[in-house]
Amino acid sequence: MASHFGDRLCVAVEKKRTPLVVGLDPVYDRLPAEIREHPEMNDSEDAGAAIDAVATFCNRVLHLVAGKVPAVKINSAYFEKYLWEGVEAYYALVSEAESLGVEVIGDVKRGDIGHTAGLYSQAHLQNPIMTGLEDIITPDAITVNGFAGADGIVPFADTANAEGKGVFVWVRASNPSAGVIQDFADADGVKMYEKLAEVVGEIAKQSERTGERGYSNVGMVVGGTSPEATTALREKYPEMWILVPGYGSQGATAADCVRFCNKDKMGALVNSSRSIIYAYDKPEYQEKFGGDWEKCIVQAVDDANAELREAIGL
C-alpha cells in the first residue's frame, strides 16, 4: 500500500468506486433497541454500560461498511463525552477500522500554535512509541481548526509528513450560520474562508507534502451545502483532497458534493453520518427490512454509493 496519504486515498477511492465516507457520530438514545435494551447496556446514565453500547454499535457499523467505502470518519466528541472510557473506546475503534483496511479520519478539530499544536499532533497522528502504548493506533488523518493561521497548521502537517498521514483543515463549514463569520469580506472583497484557503493552499503545495498522484497530504474541509460559493476552491487548489460534509441529513445532494472532484474523478471525500448510521429510523428502510437495522445501514450505503457513482461517473 502507498505510504503517502494522498496516494492511499486515490487507491482506496478507485478500489471502492466511490468517494463516500461514513461518519460515526453515535448517540446512545438513537442506537438500535437491540443494543439499548441489552441487559448489560441498557443504562444511559451508567458510563460503562453506555460506552459499551456505543462501542458495540460502532464496531458493527464498521464491519458493515468497511468493504464498501474508502474511509470512515470517527467524531471524537461523541466519545470524549464519556471521558477516559470514551477516549479508550475511540482509539479502539480506530484500531478496528485499520484492521479492516479502511482509511480512518479522526474528526478532532484540534487547533493551537507552537509546542501545544505539536503535542496535539502527536496525540492524534503519531503512533505511540512509549512502553505500554505500543498497541495504540492513531488515525490516518485528522481534522484541524486552522483559524490561528499557518502557525496552527504547519505543526500538524509536519507530523503528518513524518507519519505518512494527512490533515484536513476546516475552511468552510456546512452549517447555516457559518456564513456570518466565514463569508465576511475584507476591503478587496476576499472572504474569510477564501483567505484561510490561501494559507492552507500554500502549505499543501509544498513539494515534500505531495504524493506520486499529485495530491497533497494537506486538504480542506468544505461544506457541500454551499456549492456555488465554494466550488471555486476546487479549481484554485487542484492538489488538495477536500472533505465534504453535508451530504444527506444536512441537505447537500450528490451533485452538490461531486463538484469538488477533479477531472480525474479524485480529490473529494463525501461524508455522510446520520443518514447512514441511523438509516433504520427511515420509513423507507423500515418498510423494506423491518427491525433488521444492519440491513437498513447496508442498503443506505449502497444507495448513497449508487447516487455518487452516477453523479461522478465512477
Image (tube, rainbow, N blue to C red):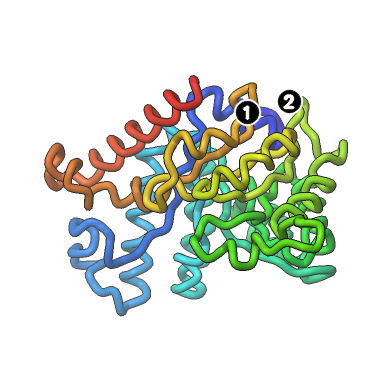
Mark number for residue 10?
Answer: 1
Amino acid under label 1?
Cys
Q: Where's residue 213, x and y in %? A: 73, 25
Provide residue 143's location: percent of width, then percent of height.
Answer: 63, 55
> For the residue labelled by badge 2, is the local secondary structure a helix, a strand or a loop?
loop
Q: Residue at x 49, y 39 (%)?
A: 256
Q: Which residue is drawn at 34% across and 31% down?
A: 302
Check disc 2 and give the amino acid type. Answer: Arg
Per the rendering, the mark at residue 213 is: 2
Q: Can residue 234 be seen in this view?
A: yes
Residue 212 location in percent, x, y? Answer: 77, 26
Q: Which of marks 1 and 2 is nearer the N terminus?
A: 1
CA gap between label 1 and label 2 equals 8 Å
129 w.r.t. 258: above or below? below
Residue 63, placed above or below residue 77: above
**Is the C-beta separation of discs 1 and 2 under 8 Å?**
yes
